[in-house]
Image (cartoon, rainbow, N blue to C red):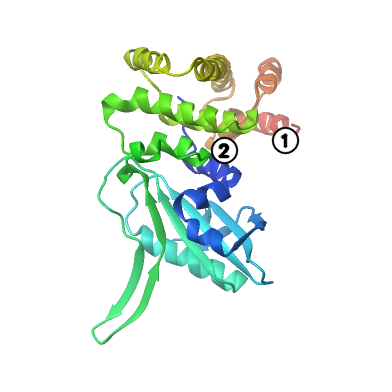
Amino acid sequence: MTKIDHDQLFKKLLTTFFVEFLELFFPSILEYLDTNSIQFIDKEVFTDVVLGEKNILDLVALAKFQEQDYSFLVHLENQASNAPEFNRRMFRYFCSLFLKYNIPIYPIVIFSYDSPQRLNRNDFVIDFPDRQVLNFNYQIIQLNRLDWHDFLKQKNPIAAALMAKMKIAPGDRPKVKAQCLRLMVTLKLDPAKMQLISGFVDTYLRLNDAEKTIFQSELSKMRLEEQEQIMQITTSWKEEGRLEGRLEEKLSITLRQLNRKLGNLPEAIATQVKSLKSDQLDLLTEDLLEFETFDDLEQWLNTL
């Protein structure tokens, strides 16, 4: 099964619906943020000198204050796992951004993991017996502590998507998926935005056969127009699933052929092969018979 790139999924969703995200969770920011000035900073890289790691920040937006020629940053980080000392990492990100841009930063974290449900920290503090040196705070949204029922009537595309990651009783999964899609189709979005939300919902609410039956029952309770639009979406999922399945099968065959021909592939080369598109895999299947070494394969990959 293909590994889910949680950060990329959330980044695409939040970049597309950034203002709607703020409107839903932090409306006070929009009282002073000039929405026409928003620019996204691509691939802001932070080097952790302590851990020796490079991290790409999920989303950094540059915006101006209303009626002022003065800017600030909104740093939005999605955390898909319960990482120890994440608060310390957020402070390092903050310091890195401030040293580079020297402007105010509004930090926000979305905790999107399923468990645990205990409230996560939203600060990083440095204390001494006689004084507090630092109290760094950031806003948090912990999805597994939010009740999806509270967002049913929100006319907001972010609500339609993120309900799929909120606190959901196991028996409610089909109902939540149906309600996410119902809310989405009522918003009358363009096809590309509808596809983004529906794909997000389908990624996090994959149903088994029994749940699919309940899902269909939930759809039958909706208005006919809503049913038709949702059925069109679910039909496209099936087609995309078939295409993805054929691609995975083709990739598996190609990797087996390469391993038999050249031996176990180095991880870096295997990663490159796994990133190939369907037509590129077809070409590779034809040409690999001529390969004698890993260098031959690398040279072939470098020509793409």
CA gap between label 2 and label 1 equals 13 Å
Who is closer to the viewer here, 75 or 86? 75
> Which residue is painted at 33% across and 75% down in the image?
126
Who is closer to the viewer here, 67 or 42? 67
> Which residue is painted at 46% across and 57% down in the image?
108
Who is closer to the viewer here, 175 or 124? 175
The amino acid type of the residue labelled 1 equals Asn
Secondary structure under tag 2 reads helix
> Which residue is painted at 35% across and 37% down in the image?
148
Proximity of marks 2 and 1: CB atoms separated by less than 8 Å? no
Q: Quadrant of the C terminus?
A: top right
Residue 232 lies in quadrant:
top right
Q: Is residue 2 visible?
A: no
**x, y percent for residue 186:** 53, 29
Q: What is the number of the mark on residue 302?
A: 1
Give the farthest residue toward the right: 303
Query: First in sequence: mark 2 or mark 1?
Result: 2
**Pointer 2 local density, CA inside 10 Å: few below 14, some 14–19, many at least 20:** few
78 w.r.t. 9: above or below: below
**x, y percent for residue 33:** 59, 62
Q: Quadrant of the N terminus?
A: top left
Give the farthest residue toward the front: 223
The amino acid type of the residue labelled 2 equals Ala
Residue 206 placement, left or right of 9: left
Who is closer to the viewer here, 93 or 273? 93
Residue 303 placement, left or right of 278: right
Secondary structure under tag 1 reads helix
Residue 281 lies in quadrant:
top right
Q: What is the number of the mark on residue 268?
A: 2
Q: What is the number of the mark on residue 201?
A: none
